[in-house]
Amino acid sequence: MYLGLDLGTSGVKALLIDDSQRVIGSGHGALTVSRPHSGWSEQDPADWIKATQEAIASLKAQFGREFAVVKGIGLSGHMHGATLIDAQDKVLRPCILWNDTRSHQEAAALDADPRFRALTGNIVFPGFTAPKLAWVENNEPEIFAKVAKVLLPKDYLRLWLTGEYLSDMSDSAGTSWLDTGKRAWSSELLAATHLTEQQMPGLVEGTAQAGVLRSELAAEWGLNTGVVVAGGAGDNAASACGMGTVAEGHAFVSLGTSGVLFAANGSYLPKPESAVHAFCHALPNTWHQMGVILSATDALNWYSGISGKSPGDLTNELGDDLKTPTGVTFLPYLSGERTPHNDAAIRGAFIGLGHESSRVVLTQAVLEGVSFAIRDSLEALKAAGTSLSRVTAIGGGSRSRYWLASIATALGIPVDIPADGDFGAAFGAARLGLIAATGANPLTVLTAPQTEAVVEPVAALREPYELAYQRYRALYPAIKSL
């Protein structure tokens, strides 16, 4: 048996698979986000451990016999988080999360240094780790002075699981300290933020062994000693491993809290000015590109709270057939935006409201706005040298066929729906645990699921959608200065 642990923003998922990659079951532990100030987003790392214990306890209660023979564990987690610990492994402050934008001034200052884009292949976004450390140095110097290690969220879980300070390439590529082409820490970039390589974890590939479960935890959980912990991956690369999106030309669209258009690459293809992320993949000698929008299902959840209707009820009101855009446009910049704007200060808007703008019209506009934001990512990927002919849909929002039809029509390419199963980040992490524990060939393990259905672009709405997208594109520069 092999265990995948996925540390998400809203909870920890523990997923168990067997040697044939059949999902045995899963457990969950809930998490919340603290937002003490506008633009801030934090979590207490102690809560990650508590949620992991809850997820494991739930899994053991249902599948105790199967859990007892776990041989390998894989890790996945939300990226870019700054988890700061001292020389005694004590957490110095709450972790600053991926969607925290307080360090936008520090990010702009680092991005102005041409070495960062040249070595990392990416813009220094406010959500990345390096500007967060610059913010801590500027605003909490007494904490910065005590930092012995900077760990990404899943790697803090690894420290608790194994006692090791290690990270994988895919997650580390989102820090702004990794030489992404060389797959190694850049002492030059670390020095630019007054840090050293000694304050970073060691680096391994996602498929490699990266520690062994501590004997105390093995005993507590009823496991044998010697359980291998894999390098693992950042959440998007782990989802790609779960989907089998590891070969050049394969891609997925993820409709989670954030939205991601992810393309696997056979070589390193940086083009930072496009605002596309160029990161290491979880497999050796592979990379990926992705466009990222900060509010996907988060946008629908926000509107759900405003309207008093559940997200499911809202999308059900739209019916089954894709509707012509109404002229009401929604900009989903509730937390700023990454691709293609790299703008932490921009905020969302409804444009074109009238007396006739019903709840259904606004729901339609929200889904279209997210679809058009993903189209922005597609255009950015094209500018970075990657062309896509189809994508596979994953994430909670992919349960809405209406939304998938909107995305297919906005992108102008088919959207594949995988057969029933759990192919997300926890499954990808479990697959990495299997590879690390058994030495299996990653390409024979990380296969794609069968396609259950294909959502084609609605040909009759291609022109109205294109006009609506061009209107959407024109609105960002129009409101930026307001």
Image: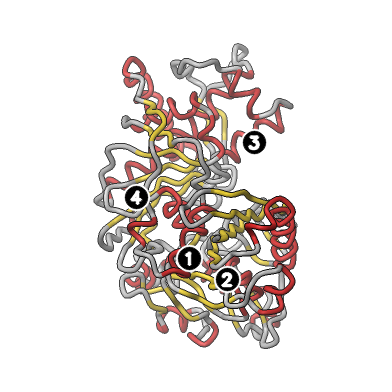
Q: Work out whether 86 lies above or below 241.
A: below
Of mark 3 and mark 4, the one earlier in the sequence is 4
Q: Nearer the viewer, residue 439 or 415?
A: 439
Using the numbered discs, state the Cα–Cα distance from disc 1 to disc 4 in whole angstroms: 16 Å
Q: Is residue 363 left or right of residue 94?
A: left
Front position in the image: 155 or 469: 155
Please give the residue where the numbered disc 1 appears in the rendered image.
171
Give whichever of 61, 251 is nearer the camera.
61
Tell me if 169 is positioned left or right of 319 in this view: left
Disc 1 on helix, strand or loop? helix
Crowd around label 4: few <14 · some 14–19 · many ≥20 (10 Å): many
Dividing the picture into quadrants, the one containing residue 411 is top left
Query: What whole-number distance in Å separates the C-alpha atoms at marks 2 and 3?
Result: 29 Å
Q: Amino acid at mark 4?
A: Ala
Proximity of marks 2 and 1: CB atoms separated by less than 8 Å = yes
Residue 301: which numbered mark, if any?
3
Q: Is residue 380 above or below residue 173?
A: above
Q: Nearer the viewer, mark 2 or mark 3?
A: 2
Q: Secondary structure at mark 2?
A: helix
- The residue that mark 4 highlights is 263
Between 433 and 316, the one nearer to me in the picture: 433
Q: CA distance from mark 2 to mark 1?
A: 9 Å
Q: Earlier in the sequence, mark 2 or mark 4?
A: 2
* Up-down relation of residue 125 to residue 116 (above or below): above
Q: Nearer the viewer, mark 3 or mark 4?
A: 4
Please name the residue shown 32% across and 20% down the image: 463
Q: Give the mark nearer the N terminus: 1 vs 4.
A: 1
